[in-house]
Image (spheres, helix red, strand yellow):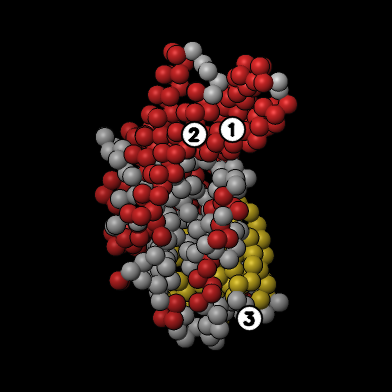
């Protein structure tokens, strides 16, 4: 984690320096504008780093929520500024080559000023779109067929709720919206596949209180994600889920019955867990070979260690579908799939883009979702 933090801070520092050079120095703005833009870039970047590190702790969580959201959204703005300015640099090389030497300086300055204005508008507009997009997780419907599904479970619906990241940015109101949309879909089963929370327990416990209102005739089940592990209060969060009426699958399985028939819902801790929260797929799936088994694992890559263990369908999240373009291009470096349905080492997997966001409350080309999966026999 320390190495990751150092790398991240280095990248953010270099990005800030780059933006200063391209937005302030290259266009040659008047001195007063240079200071204003430079101070804004540095202040927003510093505030974003503090927010990610959990340093916004004055008052209550509600008191710091807007500040955290603005600061973290700046990281997306900065990303698109950097992409736009880097692309413009390639054009600037052509401008430099085709412009007579005696006119290069004024032409490039004018070019840089125009680029700074256009790219800034584009970055702000794209980020604003992403903020609005992230506020509206929709129920997406899909069907999964299996010959192993008992007849009495034909037509059973499963709501897959993942990656809420309740905490610094997403509070009770957001969680309540998710609960209302899930309940309106009237699922038979609700699965919380990890990263429900993203903050220390004592300060943010109240954020997930609406989860107690989830309604499902066959039960509400949950597993931990990597961010439950990162909070440093995993045990407290798991106990709170149980208190709210959620069955936590701690490397374990539960039999769900309908009439004389049954299916198994099994779940494993996240692969980042250690000690009592270390993942143990063998234990979670022990004795499930003879029953249709829904397997809940936060990260889709867990399918690679679940082959030949009787898994009929794995439900996962974690990837966010990339969350902000172009990060979906990087997800395959860590995971075998980005979103949707795939068969991984003979294990069918449905991976949700997730309902919430990590860090910036922004989604670009990866809209939030709550998959509603209809199980069909055949």
In the structure shown, which secondary structural element does the residue marked by tag 2 occupy? helix
Q: Position of residue 120 (x, y in %)?
A: 57, 27
Q: Which residue is mark 1?
A: 85
Q: Residue at x 39, y 65 (%)?
A: 272
Mark 3 crowd level (few <14, some 14–19, many ≥20, 10 Å Cα): some
Q: Which residue is mark 3?
A: 148
In the structure shown, which secondary structural element does the residue marked by tag 3 occupy? loop
Q: Label 2 vs label 3: CA separation?
A: 56 Å
Q: Quadrant of the C terminus?
A: bottom right
Q: Is residue 103 left or right of residue 71?
A: right
The numbered dot on residue 325 is none
Q: Residue at x 55, y 36 (%)?
A: 82
Q: Quadrant of the N terminus?
A: bottom left
156, above or below 57, in the image: below
Indicate which disc, 2 or 1, sits on the residue closer to the N terminus: 2
Q: Position of residue 53 (x, y in %)?
A: 33, 45
Q: Camera-side residue: 313 or 107?
A: 107
Indicate which disc, 2 or 3, sits on the residue closer to the N terminus: 2
Q: Camera-side residue: 72 or 167?
A: 72
Nearer the camera: disc 1 or disc 3: 1
Outermost right residue: 98
Nearer the camera: disc 2 or disc 3: 2
Q: Position of residue 181 (x, y in %)?
A: 54, 49
Dot 2 and dot 1 residues touching (CB under 8 Å): yes
Q: Which residue is mark 2?
A: 18
Indicate which disc, 1 or 3, sits on the residue closer to the N terminus: 1
Q: Is residue 58 left or right of residue 48?
A: left
Q: Camera-side residue: 205 or 353?
A: 353
In the structure shown, which secondary structural element does the residue marked by tag 1 occupy? helix
Mark 2 crowd level (few <14, some 14–19, many ≥20, 10 Å Cα): some
Q: Label 2 vs label 1: CA separation?
A: 9 Å
Q: Residue at x 53, y 66 (%)?
A: 300
């Amino acid at each position: 984690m320390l190495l990751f933090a150092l790398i991240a801070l280095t990248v953010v520092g270099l990005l800030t320096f780059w933006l200063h050079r391209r937005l302030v120095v290259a266009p040659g703005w008047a001195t007063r504008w240079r200071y204003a833009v430079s101070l804004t870039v540095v202040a927003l970047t510093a505030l974003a780093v503090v927010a990610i590190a959990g340093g916004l702790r004055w008052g209550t969580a509600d008191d710091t929520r807007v500040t955290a959201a603005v600061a973290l959204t700046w990281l997306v703005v900065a990303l698109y500024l950097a992409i736009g300015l880097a692309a413009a640099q390639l054009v600037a090389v052509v401008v430099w080559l085709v412009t007579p030497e005696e006119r290069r300086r004024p032409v490039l300055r004018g070019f840089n000023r125009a680029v700074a204005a256009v790219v800034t508008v584009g970055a702000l507009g794209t980020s604003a779109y992403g903020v609005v997009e992230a506020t509206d997780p929709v129920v997406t419907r899909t069907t999964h067929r299996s010959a192993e599904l008992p007849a009495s479970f034909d037509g059973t619906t499963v709501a897959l709720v993942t990656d809420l990241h309740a905490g610094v940015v997403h509070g009770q109101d957001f969680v309540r919206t998710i609960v209302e949309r899930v309940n309106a879909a009237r699922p038979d089963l609700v699965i919380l596949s990890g990263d429900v929370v993203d903050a220390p327990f004592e300060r943010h416990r109240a954020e997930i209180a609406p989860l107690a209102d989830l309604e499902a005739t066959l039960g509400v089940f949950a597993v931990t994600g990597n961010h439950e592990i990162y909070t440093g209060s995993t045990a407290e969060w798991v106990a709170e889920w149980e208190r709210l009426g959620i069955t936590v699958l701690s490397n374990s399985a539960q039999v769900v019955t309908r009439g004389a028939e049954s299916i198994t819902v099994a779940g494993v801790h996240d692969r980042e867990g250690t000690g009592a929260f270390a993942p143990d797929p063998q234990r979670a799936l022990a004795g499930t070979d003879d029953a249709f088994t829904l397997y809940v694992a936060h990260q889709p890559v867990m399918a690679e260690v679940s082959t030949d263990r009787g898994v009929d369908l794995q439900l996962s999240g974690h990837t966010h579908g990339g969350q902000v373009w172009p990060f979906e291009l990087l997800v395959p470096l860590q995971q075998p799939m980005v979103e949707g349905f795939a068969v991984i080492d003979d294990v069918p997997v449905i991976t949700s883009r997730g309902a919430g966001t990590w860090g910036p409350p922004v989604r670009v080309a990866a809209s939030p979702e709550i998959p509603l999966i209809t199980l069909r026999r055949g």
